[in-house]
Image: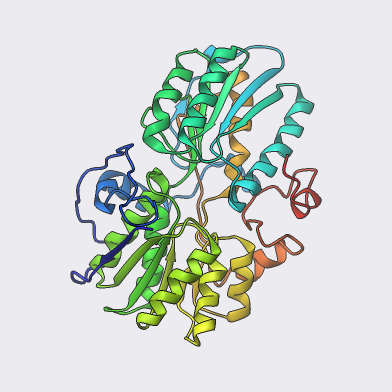
Amino acid sequence: MRRGLRSAIGIASAGALIALAGCTTDPSVEPAEGDGGAQEEAPAEEWFDQEVYDKQFKQREVEPEGPDDKPYLQMINPEMKDTSEFKSEGGKKMCFANASISNPWRQTGWITMNEQLKELKKNGVITEMETRDAQDNDDTQIADIDYFIAEGNCDGFIISPNSTAAITPAVERACKTDKPVIVFDRGVETDCAVTFIHPIGGFAWGIDTAQFLIDNLKEGDKVVALRILPGVDVLEQRWAAADKLFSEAGIEVVDYFAEGDPAEIKKVVSDELAKGDVQGIWMDAGDGAVSAIEAFEDAGKDYPVMTGEDELSFLRKWKETDMTALAPVYTNFQWRTPLLAAEKIFQGEEVPSEWVLPQSPITAEDLDEYLERNEGMPDGHYAKFGGEDLPGFPEVWQERVIP
C-alpha cells in the first residue's frame, strides 16, 4: 500500500486552472520497499495534462449529439472518420482482448456487451466474437493480442487495455494488420485505432468529485482518498484532477491504494479515524464503498461527505444513511458501443475518431429515480448500465449470468 499526504497549500476556486508538469505514462511501476509488495504510483502531477483537463472541464457541460433514448450512441463534439476502406459484405468475427472481468463494474459491462452481441448476430453483421481475458495482467494481454494477430482469423479487434503504456505496442501491432481496431474504456499512447470509445474521462470525474467535496467541506478538513490501481490513465487522471483541486482549496488529503478490497478499505479508514476526525471520503472507483461507510459506523463517528460510484450497494447505503454524497459515473453502457461501432465500420459508415460518451454523476436529486429504475438488481450492478432495451433485461443482470 502506498500512502501520500497532501497538505493544504492555499485556497483557490475549483475552476482555477494552474499549469503543472506535463503528462507522462511511464510503464515502470515498482513495488514499494517494505510495504508488502504494493505498488508505487507516479506522482499525481506527472499525470496532469492542462490541455486535456481544460477540454474535459468544458465537455462536462456539452449537450451530446445522438438519440436521447440511446446514450450508448451519443457523442460529444465528434470528429467523424471515414471508414469506407473497411466496408465489406458478410458476417464478421471480432476478437476482443479484455483487461479483465475482475470487478463488478467490468462484470456488469461484460454481461451487457454479450447481450448486445446476441442482437447483432441476428442482423448478420457481427456473427462471432472470440474473447481472451487478461485477468488484470499486462503480459497476458500482450500475449492475447499477439495470439489474435498470429491466428489471422479476426476481421477486427476490440481492445480494453489493462494499462496505458504497456499495451500500446501490442495495439500498434494489431493496427498493422490493416483490420479495424477499436479501443475502449482505457486509453493507449497511439491514435492508430479507427476509434477510441470512452466517457468524458478521468479529469472530468476528478473535477466533479473534488468540487463536490470542496463545496461541502471547509479549509483544513481531512479527506481519505481510496484508489485501486496505479498506471491506468483514467484512474491516474481522476486522482491528478482531484489532488490539484484539494490542494488549491486547502483540503488535507491522505491517499491509499486499497485495490477495491472491502477489508483493506475498512482497515484504512478505521486506522485514519483512530488518528483523528475524517470529514470526507473520495474514491477513484466505488468498489468497497460500503466498507468505508461501515468504518465510520463502527467508530461511532458522523458520516463523511463522500463520493463513491453508481454501484447499487453504494446508492442503497447512501439512501439508508441520508449522508451527503455524490455518485460519479464512468458510464457502464460504453460496453455496448464497441460492437455497434464495429457494425458501422463494416458497413462503411463514419464513426468518431474519438467517441466521447456522456458522463453525468448521480446526485441526491437523482437518487430515488435510479434506485427505482434498478429495483431488483443485485448490489454489484451499476445503475447507469444502459441495457434496459436489450431482450435479456432484467433477468440476465439480476442473475449475474457471466458468459
Quadrant housing residue 346: top right
Residue 60 appears in the figure: yes
Left or right: where does residue 92 sit relative to residue 98? right
Residue found at the far bottom of this picture: 300
Measured as percent of width and height from the top left, residue 114 is found at 71, 37
Residue at the image point whose x is 78% and y is 52% from the top: 399
Quarter of the image that includes the C terminus? top right
Can see residue 192?
Answer: no
Please tell me whether residue 204 is drawn above or below residue 85 in the rendered image: below
Residue 68 or 250: which is nearer the viewer? 250
Query: In terms of image quadrants, where is residue 110?
Result: top right
Of the 4 image quadrants, the one containing the N terminus is: bottom left
Identify the residue shown where x is 56% and y is 42%.
74
The residue drawn where x is 39% and y is 24% is: 169
Residue 255 x, y percent position in the rendering: 35, 63
In the displayed structure, 168 sits above or below 173; it is: below
Please tell me in which quadrant of the rendered image residue 176 appears.
Answer: top left
Q: What residue is at 43 percent from the left and 47 percent from the top?
A: 201
Colouring convention used in this rendered image of the protein: rainbow
Position of 8 relative to 332 (above/below): below
